[in-house]
């Protein structure tokens, strides 16, 4: 079950991710190949996530979880 605090941490991690985070996680391609995906992510993050192939969505979820855990660790 996700708590309100969990949801806040997930949301903060998601909106604070930059292109290099997505590239490193394999969610979008590096360089010019990822330009269109990065633009779509910035314009409509939710639709971008819904349209991702499962393996890329799993990579994004892992990246968000890692960032969320780092944020929680730095706030204590």
Image (spheres, rainbow, N blue to C red):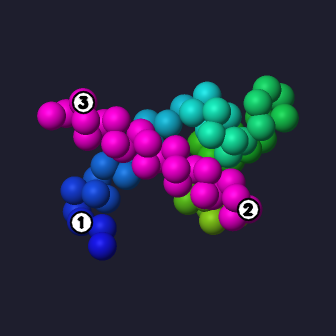
Q: Is residue 54 magenta?
A: yes
**In the rendered structure, which disc, 2 or 1, sits on the residue that comes first in sequence?**
1
Marks 2,1: beta carbons within 8 A = no
For residue 7, side relative to residue 22 (left or right):
left
Closer to us: 33 or 44: 33
Rendered-image quadrant of the N terminus: bottom left
Which portion, as a residue range, is magenta? 53-76
Q: Secondary structure at mark 2?
A: loop
Residue 19 appears in the picture as rendered: no
Q: Position of residue 22 (x, y in %)?
A: 62, 38
Q: Position of residue 5 (x, y in %)?
A: 22, 56
Q: Position of residue 50 (x, y in %)?
A: 63, 65
For residue 22, side relative to residue 31 (left or right):
left
The residue drawn where x is 68% and y is 54% is 56
Q: Secondary structure at mark 1?
A: loop
Q: Which mark is residue 3?
A: 1
The residue drawn where x is 52% and y is 50% is 62
**In the rendered structure, which disc, 3 or 2, sits on the residue that comes first in sequence?**
2
Judging by the rendered image, the residue that carries numbered circle 2 is 53
Q: Which mark is residue 74?
A: 3
For residue 53, side relative to residue 6 (left or right):
right
Task: Give the main secondary structure of the magenta stretch.
Answer: helix
Depicted 9 relative to depicted 55: above or below: above
Q: Position of residue 46 (x, y in %)?
A: 55, 59
Mark 3 is surrounded, within 10 Å at the Cα level, by few (under 14), some (14 to 19) or many (20 or more) other residues, namely few
Rendered-image quadrant of the C terminus: top left
Q: Is residue 72 magenta?
A: yes
């Amino acid at each position: 079950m996700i708590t309100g605090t969990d949801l806040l941490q997930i949301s903060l991690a998601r909106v604070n991710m930059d292109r290099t985070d997505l590239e490193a996680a394999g969610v979008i391609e590096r360089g010019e190949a990822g330009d269109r995906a990065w633009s779509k992510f910035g314009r409509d993050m939710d639709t971008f996530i819904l349209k991702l192939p499962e393996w890329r969505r799993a990579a994004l979820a892992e990246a968000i979880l890692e960032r969320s855990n780092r944020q929680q660790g730095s706030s204590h």
